[in-house]
Image (cartoon, rainbow, N blue to C red):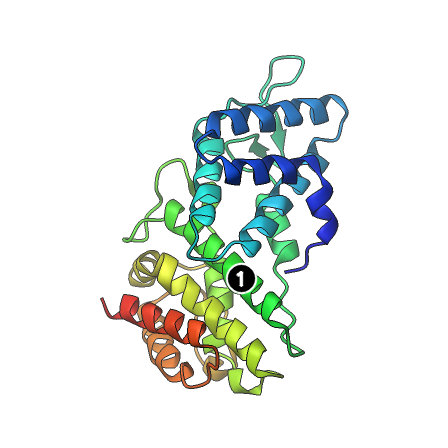
Amino acid sequence: MDISPKITECEEYKILSSHLANPEKTDATLDQLTTCAKSSLSNDKLESHLRELWTSILHLSSQQSHTSKEQDSLVKLLQALITDAPSLKNTNNKEVEVDGSKVWQGLPLFGQQARECWNFPNDKEVDTKTREAWINVNAFVARLTAAAVNEHGGERPGYNALDYSLYGIWSLRSALEEETENLPGKTTIDASIGAAAAWILYAGRTLKGLSDSDKTYSGKVAKPGFKCKDQDWRGYNKDRWQLWTKELAESKNLVQDDGIQDLVKQALETMEQ
């Protein structure tokens, strides 16, 4: 995760931290975020506000255990922003859009911000803190995707802004379609495999549904990894799912950390259901 620790100093981060301490006060949090957005709109700083808000959410999710209720709280908050927060309007009473999406319904710039942060240093051995943060944020984005796409691969009405299934392919490809054993250290290997396992554990049924329905993406963003370079994959499909099942089962022998071994075990059980 490429996020500056200075994000903890911004107002958006403080609002979100308070929400995690009091998750039952969702309406109050939505009011606070709306007030911040209106203030930033009047100062012509709305885009900056949104970027700091989304970065704060991503950073917080990376610091919460993937098994924690705090991750659930952040997912539910984003769902509430889409369905319950009033549309932001300008002085002419017109709904405000940023980058072609309404505030808040389209979560404008969230995808851009997630993409900017989605950098794992797989060219060096990482510490355990970085390993855990990478697994946690993958689990969080997997939870978002499961909230947006059902187990048949179809959209859940109103939540398409939470669909980050492409990111699932990226993490699964990195861990299961590349030469993982050639990564520079044991902790880096654990992080890569753990992130893939988190996607299966928290969005496995969704990803299986996308595989059964042959979900594809434009261009080569979902192309196969080195070990599958002869395949013409451009998204999810049954053959790719079968390969992931096989490779994840074999990869557990590379994992050193007991907690991640258990995560892989749970992911495999999910795939076998």
Crowd around label 1: few <14 · some 14–19 · many ≥20 (10 Å): few
Which one is in front, 34 or 61? 61
Quadrant into which the N terminus falls: bottom right
Looking at the image, is 45 positioned above or below residue 213?
above
Vertical order, 146 against 89 (above or below): below
Residue 24: percent from left, percent from top: 43, 32
Residue at 41%, 86% in the rendered image: 253
Residue displayed at 69% across by 45% down: 8
- Residue 30, horizontal then vertical, whole percent: 53, 27
The residue beneath circle 1 is 219
Observer-nearest of 75 and 82: 75
Looking at the image, residue 56 sits to the left or right of residue 216; the answer is right
User: Could you tell me which residue is drawn at 33 percent across and 68 percent down?
Assistant: 266
The number of discs equals 1
Residue most extreme to the right: 43
Can residue 159 be seen in this snapshot?
yes
Do we see residue 222 in this rendering?
no
Report the amino acid beneath label 1. Answer: Gly
Task: Tell me which corner region of the image, top left, top right, bottom left or bottom right, holds residue 16.
Answer: top right
Counting from the top left corner in percent of width and height, residue 125 is at 64, 79
- Looking at the image, which residue is at 61% across and 59% down? 118
